[in-house]
């Protein structure tokens, strides 16, 4: 499964996405039965990378010139979390 997020600017920096993505992970690994959830992030987006790190996602690598955006090809960083990692980290150990 893949997860993405793009809140309106008025809601940035309030800690909402860590909470929302964490809830989505619980739904994906729980009722939906996913084994792996991935996210693709602009490698220059420090806030989004911080979000991935905070939640315990693992960076798998760089997808080179993977998307065409505003007239140019851009890289994307590939992040993922496995169900076993989610279970190991579990709710109490994720620092939101
Ligand atoms: C990236 C984004 C999803 C994070 O969600 P959020 O609800 O703002 O998350 P938080 O409030 O927890 O902030 C994220 C973390 O990044 C940090 N951060 C914010 N701006 C930063 C910057 N310019 N450089 C480094 N870290 C930054 C925050 O301090 C916070 O870390 P902390 O808890 O250790 O202090 C949100 O800011 C956003 O949507 N931005 C624009 C759209 C976007 O980039 N979407 C993602 C596409 S991949």
Image: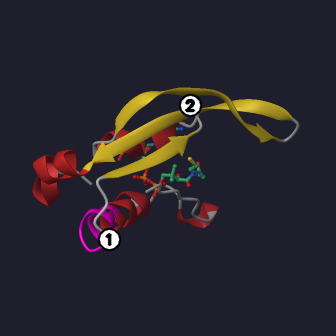
Q: Quarter of the image containing the N terminus?
A: bottom left
Residue 12 picture location, percent across and down = 53, 58
* Front in this rendered view, residue 71 or 64: 64
Q: Residues within 10 Å of mark 1 (few under 14, many from 20)?
A: few
Q: Are marks 2 and 1 in contact (CB under 8 Å)?
A: no
Q: Residue at x 54, y 65 (%)?
A: 11
Secondary structure predominantly adopted by residues drawn in magenta: helix
Residue 93 picture location, percent across and down = 13, 50
Q: Name which of mark 2 and mark 1 comes first in the sequence.
A: 1
**Magenta-highlighted residues:** 25-31
Q: Describe residue 63's horizontal placement relative to residue 73 as left or right.
A: left
Q: Residue at x 59, y 31 (%)?
A: 44
State yes or no: Cβ of the residue under disc 2 lies below 8 Å from any atom of ligand 1.
Answer: no
SS under mark 1:
loop
Counting the numbered discs, the total is 2
SS under mark 2:
loop
- The residue sitting at the bottom extreme is 31
Based on the picture, tell me whether residue 37 belongs to the magenta stretch. no
Residue receiving disc 2:
43
Nearest to viewer (mark 2 / mark 1): 1
Q: Quarter of the image containing the C terminus?
A: bottom left
Q: Residue at x 30, y 70 (%)?
A: 27
- Mark 2–mark 1 Cα distance, whole angstroms, equals 29 Å
Q: Is residue 17 above or below residue 86?
A: below
Q: Describe residue 52's horizontal placement relative to residue 4 as left or right.
A: left
Q: Is residue 95 above or below residue 14?
A: above
Residue receiving disc 1:
32
Residue 34 quadrant: bottom left
């Amino acid at each position: 499964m893949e997860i993405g997020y793009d809140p309106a600017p008025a809601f940035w920096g309030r800690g909402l996405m860590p909470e929302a993505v964490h809830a989505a992970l619980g739904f994906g690994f729980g009722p939906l039965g996913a084994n792996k959830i991935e996210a693709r992030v602009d490698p220059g987006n420090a806030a989004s990378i911080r979000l991935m790190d905070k939640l315990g996602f693992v960076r798998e690598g760089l997808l080179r010139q993977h998307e065409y955006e505003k007239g140019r090809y851009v890289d994307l960083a590939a992040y993922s979390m496995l169900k076993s990692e989610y279970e190991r980290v579990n709710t109490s150990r994720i620092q939101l």
